[in-house]
Amino acid sequence: MEVKIVSEIWLRPSSPTPPHLRHYRLSLIDLLTPGTCMPFIFFYKHDELINPNPQLELLKNKLSETLSDFYVLAGKIMEDDRTVVICNDDGVRYVEARVDCEMSEVMSHSDLTQMNTLLPSDDHLKFNGTHLASIQINVFECGSLAIGLCMSHKIMDAAGVGVFMNAWAAAARSSVDDSNPKPNFNSSSVFQAKNPWAKEVAALFEPNLKPGNFITRRLVFYPPSIEKLRDEVAAGVRQRPTRVQALSALLWKSHMKAFHKMKELKNEEKGITSPTSALYHTVNLRTRTRAALPITNHTVGNVAWYAAALTHHSLTPDLSFLSQKIREGIAKLDADFVDRLTGDEAEAKPAVFEFMKDITTPLSSQIAFASWCRLGLYDPDFGWGKPVWIGGWAVKTAAFYNRVVLIETGDGQGIEVWVNADEPELELIVNDPEVLRFALVDPSPLLNEIRGD
């Protein structure tokens, strides 16, 4: 597959940002979020598109209009004070490209790394320079489109990406009803970071790269398998686990088993350095705030926190037990916890340092999860239907840590899981017989469309 860039511009908002919005200060949670790139690829089937120019012009013009509301994306982080975005309407990097094959050829290929050329940035670990967003529109020979996004994680989380994409799509459909309210960037006024301690702690949150050849593999769990897994996990707990909790427990268990196996393969001494294994799970706080706070589902920024679950490292951990630990960790991030993060230094600082204590506990292994389910990522319709598939960055490099992302299949019934880990450990995780009882490994994304799943 060859991707040829045919045009590249800096696309500015259609109307200037008002003077009183020209300086956007990052929130406490923004500061504690690594400055990595968040990659997304939205695939749209459009077989009847003979001349793509009208659609490309529509996408570009409506994006310019949308950036007037998402003005922070068109700004730049200050070089001398990286806690402030200058909303100067510099614009976003906007690329149009042609792909020398049909979309079905790309989606039927199991090598996810080839899709990285559909993204406008080649480095997922950092955002080059001080600009905050890049977008690449890819046109396939069949007329289908793939929209590749790279957004700075300092500015928004996955939920914010969903808000942005749905707003852009609504503008393209000329839909401005109550179902598409404007975004708000008020998280910095709620989770304030005015005190020096916030900057000091932010430096501690920047993770270090782990050596190794980290790669990404894709698993798909269809509804019958998910329900079977939930039934098995529920047999040992008081409350039936959610889909995400059950799948997270399954992969956490597989991760621990792979960790032990890797030590054996490396001929290391039996036993482990520390008796603790940790799971961190991103939790969307938008639905966990009190009504009095001006945080809504259309708040753009980082409005999420990590739930921590720690347990004694075991070669054969119990799924029900692990699921319960995950549930308990998530339950701690309630409205009272959010109140602490929104409070003054006397309240917010201890809340942050409690989490710091968890992540600095001597560990034998750790794995981080993020759920992108129920964020509306499969909803954006620009007038030619919703995405047939959403892909992400297929990492093949060093990485910060073992990472797992969960996202719904197009119909919302199944769940895709992208697992990123050092290659030898990753192979053990995805080929664990217990995982294979429930998952398909690296199936073609096109299967979802063919099966209607």
Image (spheres, rainbow, N blue to C red):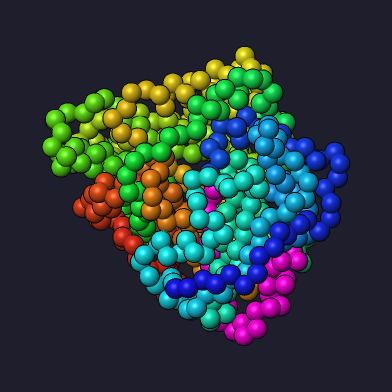
Rendered-image quadrant of the C terminus: bottom left
Left or right placement of residue 54 versus residue 311 in this view: right
Depth check, front residue: 357 or 201: 201
Depth check, front residue: 254 or 176: 254
Depth check, front residue: 75 or 190: 75
Depth check, front residue: 186 or 452: 186
Q: Is residue 139 magenta?
A: no
Vertical placement of residue 350 versus 225, above or below: above
Residue at the outermost right position: 19
Left or right placement of residue 250 versus residue 115 in this view: left
Regarding residue 447, the answer to whether it shows in the image is no
Vertical placement of residue 77 versus 435, above or below: above
Residue plotted at (84% across, 55% down): 15
Q: Is residue 49 magenta?
A: yes
Left or right placement of residue 406 versus residue 337 in this view: left
Residue plotted at (71% across, 59% down): 10
Q: x, y (%) of residue 290?
A: 65, 31
Vertical placement of residue 52 versus 12, above or below: below
Residue plotted at (16% across, 39% down): 266
Magenta stretch bounds = 37-62
Q: x, y (%) of residue 4?
A: 55, 72
Vertical placement of residue 157 versus 60, above or below: above
Q: x, y (%) of residue 25?
A: 71, 34
Residue plotted at (60% across, 23% down): 198
**Which quadrant holds residue 191?**
top right
**Which quadrant holds residue 300?**
top right
